[in-house]
Image: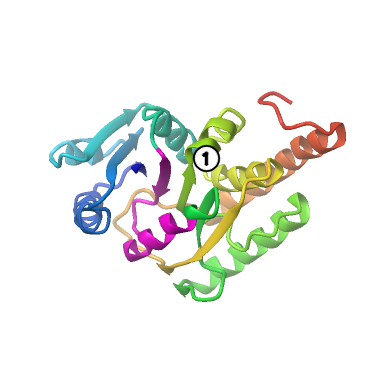
Amino acid sequence: MKIIIVIPVHNEETIIEQNIHSVLNVFDEQLAHDDWKLLIAENGSTDRTAKIIHTIIHPRLHILSFSQSGKGRTIREAWRTEPNADIYAFMDADLASDLKDIPALFAALSSHDIAIGSRRVKGAHVTQTFLRRIISFAYTCTAHLFLNLSIHDLQCGFKAVKKDVTNELLPLIQNDGYFFDTELIALATLHGFRIAEVPIHWQETPDPRRKNHMHLGKTSHQMFLDLIHLRKRLKISRNIGVKLHNKV
């Protein structure tokens, strides 16, 4: 089985070298019987991130560089560089999601089209600040209301999909930023793909040295606007009774 795992990276000079080595060590052990490739997708970094990742050598590690930043854009473009894989996955560079849950994530694809790491289902173990928990809960409730979704955790950066999903949905996804996760799940639901929520171990990783801090207030506001836009697209699609096209 050919597996492509993408880690989008933007201004992560303080953590990226150690975290890449951690990922490679775990994958060497847990994915020993698979044909896997790790793509480090550096996008628009202004610090030493690009120089650091190019010093790391491993036969299954490949470095991609994109001039523009943006999680969604970077994942889509990275996946497209490997058109013949069986499974496509991505994870956040801070490794908040525990790598020991990787086998369970991929195993879920034996019966589902999409597997998402979930911090909100039974069996999950989560360490998270109260503020982030409240914002996450409020966003999820709003997304359920706006998009009629039943998924408990939309935004966890720990997801894997089958090739059919990328073939059908990547041309439809429009968001270039953090909203990519929600749009992927919403479109997958609309198109009838089976989604599994896999309980994971997740620990918030605050580090004052990191430049790539997600500004919760600004990001949350933008994602609520993205919810409104996507709701309009989905409503149009449902009203006319056809699957969503790239331009609505």
How is colour applied across the structure in the image?
A: rainbow
Q: Is residue 141 left or right of residue 27?
A: right
Task: Check the picture and name the quadrant holding the N terminus.
Answer: top left
Left or right of residue 144: residue 75: left
Which residue is at 32% across, 61% downward? 99
Identify which residue is drawn at 56% across, 49% down.
219
- Highlighted magenta segment, given as a residue range: 86-108
In this picture, is 234 found above or below 130? above
Q: Is residue 44 above or below residue 15?
A: above
Q: Residue at x 76, y 53 (%)?
A: 148
Percent x, y of residue 121: 56, 71
What x and y, as percent, mark residue 163? 48, 37
Q: What amino acid is labelled 1 in the image?
A: Gly
* Residue nearest the viewer, comparing 55 with 27: 27
Comparing 31 with 23, the one in front is 31
Residue 102 located within the stretch drawn in magenta: yes
Location of residue 125 (image quadrant): bottom left
- Left or right of residue 19, residue 230 in this image: right
Q: Which residue is mark 1?
A: 177
Q: Nearer the viewer, residue 193 or 93?
A: 193
Q: Is residue 96 visible?
A: no
| Picture layout, residue 233 above or below residue 179 | above
Looking at the image, which residue sits at the far top? 247
| Quarter location, residue 5 | top left
Circle 1 sits in a helix, a strand or a loop, which is it? loop
Q: Quadrant of the C terminus?
A: top right
- Seen at 34% across and 51% down, the residue is 93
